[in-house]
Image: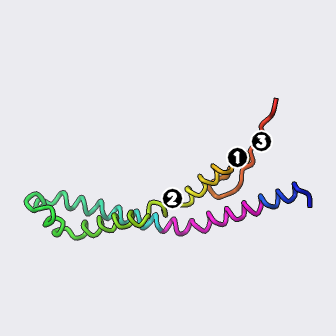
Amino acid sequence: MSLEQTACEDLKAFERRLTEVIARLQPATTRWRIVLVIVALGTAFGAYMWLTDPKTQDATFLQSLLNHPFFTVAAAALIILFILGIHKKVVSPSIITSRTRAVLVDFNMSCDDTGKLILKPRPTTT
């Protein structure tokens, strides 16, 4: 095998592995996005109900939170999710592709969002 054929096989193997990694992350990323949307919408709805309640003005902060357990639980769940790193889990495929693109620039290449390699034309020397 020539050096060029070996390099081509290595690029194909790298591309297969990169697409495999990104494809494997997609279902988990979708699930985490759904969880985040549900918890965020629940928190927004609970906040609306909490803020529009006329009894909230007369109660202390802690008492008003105890009067609205749905908002309290939803807001606590949202805070816990962010502490546990849901923001990274939601965007993990894009983090991997952006870091891969940064490395591939040195080799005059790039990749799309699915991990397929994009070979850029060689720069012309004058």
**How far from the left and from the top, in percent, is residue 56?**
13, 60
Q: Which residue is mark 2?
A: 91
The numbered mark, 2 or 3, whose residue comes first in the sequence reads: 2
Secondary-structure class at tag 3: loop
Counting from the top left corner in percent of width and height, residue 51 is at 19, 57
Q: Give the residues drawn in magenta, as a range.
A: 12-31
Q: Is residue 13 magenta?
A: yes
Q: Is residue 57 above or below residue 27?
A: above
Residue corresponding to mark 1? 106
Q: Nearer the viewer, mark 1 or mark 3?
A: 1
Q: CA distance from mark 2 to mark 3?
A: 30 Å
Identify residue for label 3: 121
Quarter of the image for residue 19 reads bottom right
Q: Is residue 55 left or right of residue 123?
A: left
**Secondary element type, mark 2:** loop
Residue type marked 3: Pro
